[in-house]
Amino acid sequence: MALIALGVTGGIGAYKAVEVCRGLQKAGHDVVAVMTRSAARFVGPVTFEAITRRPVITSQWRPGANADIEHIAIADEIALLLVAPCTANTLGKFASGIADDFLSSLYLATRAPVLLAPAMNSNMLAHDAVQQNLRVLTGRGVRMVEPGEGYLACGWIGKGRLAEPAEVVSAALDMLAPPASILRGRRVLVTAGPTYEDIDAVRYVGNRSSGRMGFALADEARRRGATVTLIAGPTSIEPPVVAETVRVRSAREMHSAVMAAAQSADVVIMAAAVADYTAATRAEDKIPKSEGPMTLVLERTPDILADLARLPSRAASATPVLVGFAAETGNAVAKARAKRTRKNVDLIVANDVSAPGAGFDVPTNEVTIVSEAREQHVALASKERVAQAILDQIEIILTRTRTAVPAS
């Protein structure tokens, strides 16, 4: 499921945008509506709010501490910016780089693909200025849904009416189709979230991992056509829908699940924050508190990544591709380089979890992807964007060294 920003501008065709929204939702996508001030004269924002179950964005000056950068946040999250109807005025703004409202600011800020469905009077559509704007935008890679012909709101008959909702939805779905990927048909195993190491019947040792990074990787691998198995520790957020999801609690449980699933995997991505230590003994009942200190004896947990590197298939065919994470609080890249060599894995993703906006329990991350051949720094971005960069590097490795078509 993708998040689509549906821009609605001030034309009579705005009523058709309601059906466009419905069509996108029926196809399994989530929609956030962005309405210009003029659009609200044709269709009330409450209509889109009821359909999308999201607040409708009508102004870049909405009260709130982060309202002034909301267009940046949405720009980073959406998979597609669709504007239907798109008036001549909005075409001109987009072509000229004018950002005087939320929608035009969103257009400049997003790196998602853009689809426009122009709608206007026939003479306006044929005007040299509008045609020039259309050429400028298509030259930048913006896709268009051609206006339809027939009766216009002004009473004229000609080309300029908004394309039918089904046609707009079809064009949007075509743009959201998964890209051609070497991952298509391959088996990808992803781990996510923390592990909880029980001390007694009530207490445990854990960490602040939310699972968001692993979930983003699993969802992106699925989007690229892979058959994904997700092994997740305890998380409070819902995992993406993939071929198989296995829930575990402890590091030992995760080790067993991973080693079993890795036998048939082409790629293993160890994004989980697996505990390095667990209680040497677990009390069956709650340990009563006492006045003095409590001594807790810990022992090492199984090293899942190291055991994966020792699989017989790794020696025979360097399969599966192994990806680890190095969550550190200083010198993350240097530590990741050493870890990649020590663990004999293909990629290590280094991130400083003490950096603002990166690491655990936040929707963003900043990482450096370390391989034998190169290092790629990914500046602070949504974890979905970071997942895309990591999968891109995995595809490079598969293309160079493992080009055989997987067995069906």
Image (spheres, grey):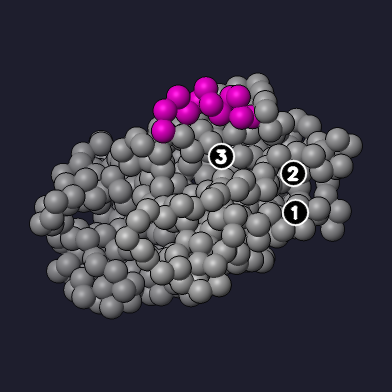
Residue on which disc 3 sits: 325
Tell me where residue 79 appears, x and y as whole percent.
44, 53
Instruction: Tell me the residue at 74%/35% (across/down).
Output: 399
- As rendered, which of 198 and 338 lies closer to the eye? 198
Q: Position of residue 297 (x, y in %)?
A: 54, 50
The amino acid type, in three-letter code, at marker 3 is Phe
Query: Which element carries disc 3, helix, strand or loop?
Result: strand
Whether tag 1 and tag 2 are in contact, CB under 8 A, the answer is yes
Kind of residue indicated by mark 2: Leu
Image-based side of 153 in relation to 395, left or right: left
First in sequence: mark 1 or mark 2? Answer: 1
User: From the image, which quarter does the C terminus lie in?
Assistant: bottom right
**What is the C-alpha distance between the residues marked 2 and 3?**
14 Å
Say if 397 sits above or below 184 in the image.
above
Q: Within the image, what quadrant is residue 156 found in?
A: bottom left
Residues shaded magenta: 329-340
* Residue behind mark 1: 259
User: Does any portion of residue 66 appear in the rendered image?
Assistant: yes
Closest to the observer, 218 or 299 = 299
Instruction: Report the Cα–Cα distance between label 3 and label 1.
Output: 18 Å
Residue type (three-letter) at the residue carrying disc 1: Met
Percent x, y for residue 32?
A: 33, 63
The residue nearer to you, when weighing 391 against 161, is 391
Q: In this view, does 367 lie to the left or right of 106?
A: right
48 versus 63 height, above or below: below
Whether residue 116 is visible, yes or no, is no
Q: Are marks 3 and 1 in contact (CB under 8 Å)?
A: no
